[in-house]
Amino acid sequence: MASPEIISGLGSRDSVIHLSPGAEQRGLTGEELALGRAAGAGTPLGEVLRRAGLPEPRAIALLLSMRMRGLIGPGKLAGAAAQAVARPAPQIDLAALAEAVDLDEGRKREILEAEARCQDANLFRVLGLPDGEEAAQVKKAYYELTKAFHPDRYYGKALGSFKGRVEKVFKRFTEAQAVLTDANRRAAWLQEHPQFAGAPAEAVASEHSEERRARLSRHPYMARFAKVHELTARGKQALEKGDFARAQSDLNQASQIDPKNADLQKLLVQAKKGGDKARAQREFVEGESAEKMGDLAGAIAHFKSAAALDLENAKLALHLSRLLQSAGGESELKDAVGFARRAAELEPNNADCHLAYAKVLLRAGLEKNAAREYEQVLKLRPGDATAKEQLRKLKWKF
Amino acid sequence: MEREPVVGIDLGTTNSVVATVQNGQAVVIKNRAGANLTPSVVALAGNGKRLVGAIAKRQAVTNAENTAYAVKRLIGRKYSSAQVQDALKILPYRLRSGQHDDVKVLLAGKEFAVPELSAMVLSELKADAEAFFGQTVKKAVITVPAYFNDGQRQATKDAGQIAGLDVLRIINEPTSAALAYGFGKEVSGKVAVFDLGGGTFDISVLQLSGGVFEVLATGGDTFLGGEDFDNRIIEWLAQLFAKENGADLRADKMALQRLKEASEKAKCELSATRETQINLPFIYTPKAGGSAAHLQKSLTREKLEELTGDLVERCIERSKVTLEEAGTRVQDIQEVILVGGMTRMPQVIEAVKKFFGREPCKGVHPDEVVALGAAIQANALVAEAASVVLLDVTPHSLGVAIAGGYARTLIPKNSTVPTSATELFSTSKDMQTVVKIMVLQGESEMATQNELLGEFVLSGLRPALRGEVEIAVTFDISADGIVSVSAKDTATGKRQSITVTASGGLTQDELARILEEQRDYMLEAQTEEEARSKRNELSALVAQVESALNRAEVAAASHGGGGELLGKARRQLDQARKVTAGGLGLRAVLASHDELTATLTSLRGVADRLVGR
């Protein structure tokens, strides 16, 4: 039977129609009722026409009039039926592959596949796109297809049957693209083929809510809040990345807008600490390199600023103390005692720290304190020879 | 293997340029005199020698009657057309009507068809290209104004063939300019090409995207160009001279030629200076004897702008329309490309700047860019791995004539080619067994206002009541721009088709006469969709008229009068009900709709008047 694939006003034979809810109560004739029941909650048009038991032109006329009165509408397939009409993979005309033309096998196959795709009633699929793809993407895809399928690309070649195929394919692409990129035509087409709309409803909703959100955030009060939120988020991110300077600046700004935010204060402290530590680390490295160069004074200065920034680094304090001792001088010795003490206090269970502290105390002439530290060393490390020896010496004095 | 050379030719109104692509670069081929531009001038010298280009232009003053210039404005036109008749008045060479109302140019007593003259220019350019390549050049892309119709394109193609060229493609000048602008650049976005040349104005809007050039819309005016600006100066000078000396210089061919040259020169000079002198000594010798008169005038830029302001305004108006057709706003245009010598005029640049709100692109040479683009397209067609694809559009709507003398468009203007469209029509008379398919090009709803591209007959239809035989008419435009039309009787499968090759060569009067004669063989538009929606509209209207009629009847009953109108309204209402119920054709629906709309207004008026009285 040579009945057309697409029935004007109703769609293609495999597009789905359904009987609108409540339509049965709206005074249908017997024939109309039969058609409506055949459509049910969603049946392909071709199937409805077969089931109706009416001559096809009559059935189509009736369906058209029902469509106009809103008694039937395009619908989605119900469950198992959906599986049944799932389209098989497009069949390509294999005989054409053998045709002797100025095209290689791959090209021929591409053209034939495109030709097969063009049969699809779904314009998105014709262009090789997911359902409901937005206009800008459609255009992009079309341009890509143009590069491969525009007839100019085959100018002057012996193409045989492929000449017609390429033109046909390209025209179909152009048409599909023209419909999908024109807001009015696209809307009209989608109304006729709602099953290809993808998920536009959600997209629209999210677009709307995004718009609402944007509008709300423009309100001065909300804007302030949004700003704090944004700065905090950015600060946190910077903190995680170890960019403490950035984090501090963001968080500082945020806390200026919202000074009572305790969480913000905590984060700020964290950022400050992190920042100090990082700077201390830099000073430490510079100090080390100065030390290697033999620049004792410079090294001491760097280590000192490192120690000022990082109050919890015992090793640094210890090292600094040793350096200060070797530098000689009254005040340096005093400082050396101070740093050694900090080291010992930071790591009370480290015998070496106490040992170093004791040593510097001894040098500074604070024998009583030194003796106490040596005793501490012995407590931690009972067999320590140095401590034993020094203690004995110290005791000998008395 | 060395590829056969291909060239792009800009066959201009005043100047022509030939270019090619070499090592991935588009270059202009200099002519044998060493110039980039070859004047599109052809002359027959006294000794019968044929002169083309700069030589022909140089001797124009002394041999005005045998020197043909600006023939592009005549190509593919009918002798009786208004444009040719206007041109007759100002051209120093003689024109004559050919057998099919085509234009023949008379040079030294010999008749030349316009394409023949264009072919002479093309041959000259072909020879230049051959000198450049050192081998025969056959393949060429030739450009035409975007607004050229099918007949003009065909005539240009003929000219190429006469010159021994294999014309690969005829492309639009603005499109070509855009190709040259975007070639080898990674540009994406919308560009407008504003092309004001010697004879025509074209405006195109294109979308560029990674080597794909899509024409969104194109438009223009085939009789708006530099020559019109010149003519304004000529008229101004002639009028001044007539006032002072009482003689019309335009009557004297040689004087006219001198005026023309001086005007063109003055116009060009005023692009750089603010004032210029026009000196034409001994331009007129009184017939009755006496001393010769001289023409000596100074022309300021302001005066010129006053003389030509409306021409520039026309360009901007056209641009507005074309932008709308492209669905583009002015602010979406990323770049404006100026093409054509006339875009050097400060007044034009200012107007463009003001309209588009941006400085026009300065990266392209307005005289050469079109030829370069043509060369790029020629190369893209022939090359194995072309980097550009052009998506061009049809510049005019195509359709068929239907009953009542209307035109029904099947392919609207600015459709991307290749394209095709099919629509169902039916017979317009009872027992009609023959339909005449008349292929029209143009935007008018009236068939006679459009151009007839060709016609054919589909016969052997089943005798039936009118509207019962369905005929599917299919239009097809190939990538080459060739239009083919076929008609099929859907019941019998009987099919007829033509490929439109040349303009029908008919005047509007002839077309009108044919349409009148063929009334019995016309198609009827079968636009069920439209009819249905109109029918719905009509039902709504019927309801409105009913209530208005009731009101008017009540008013008439209590105040008297209005009887005639009420009677008419009742009759029309009955008719409308019949139309809505009986499924009559679209035309009946529309007619009824119009009637009722008018009646509704007067009914309301009557009711108001009666009540208010």
Image (cartoon, coloured by chain):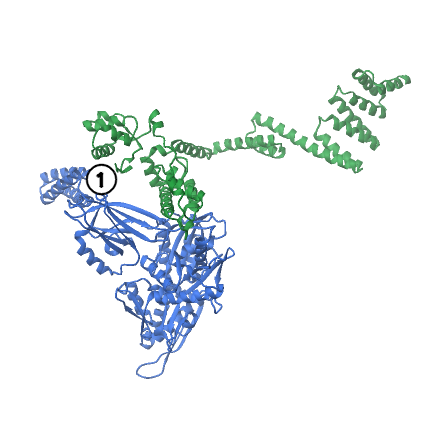
Q: Colour of chain A?
A: green
Quarter of the figure with residue A81: top left
Can residue B310 be seen from the camera position used here? no
Name the spot of residue B472 as percent of width and height, x first: 25, 45
At a point 22% along the width and 26% down the height, the residue shown is A34
**Does residue B185 sit above or below A269 in this rendering?**
below
Quarter of the figure with residue A87: top left
Structural crowding at the residue carrying mark 1, measured as other residues with C-alpha within 10 Å and reported as few (<14), some (14–19) or many (≥20): some
- Is B406 on the left-hand or right-hand side of B203? left
Name the spot of residue B437 as percent of width and height, x first: 23, 52
Q: Nearer the viewer, residue B382 or B576?
A: B382
Q: Chain of mark 1?
A: B
What is the quadrant of the N terminus of chain A in the image? top left
Q: Nearer the viewer, residue B173 or B292?
A: B173
What is the quadrant of the C terminus of chain A in the image? top right
Name the spot of residue B539 as percent of width and height, x first: 19, 38
- Dot 1: what SS? helix
Quarter of the figure with residue B423: top left
**Does residue B208 sit above or below B152 in this rendering?**
above
Q: Nearer the viewer, residue B510 or B218?
A: B510
- Is A374 on the left-hand or right-hand side of B569? right
Q: How many badges with numbers are in the image?
A: 1
Name the spot of residue A100 as percent of width and height, x first: 41, 47
Indicate the amino acid at tag 1.
Answer: Arg
Can residue B114 be seen from the camera position used here? yes
**Does residue A274 sit above or below B493 in this rendering?**
above
Q: Which chain is blue?
A: B
Residue underneath mark 1: B532
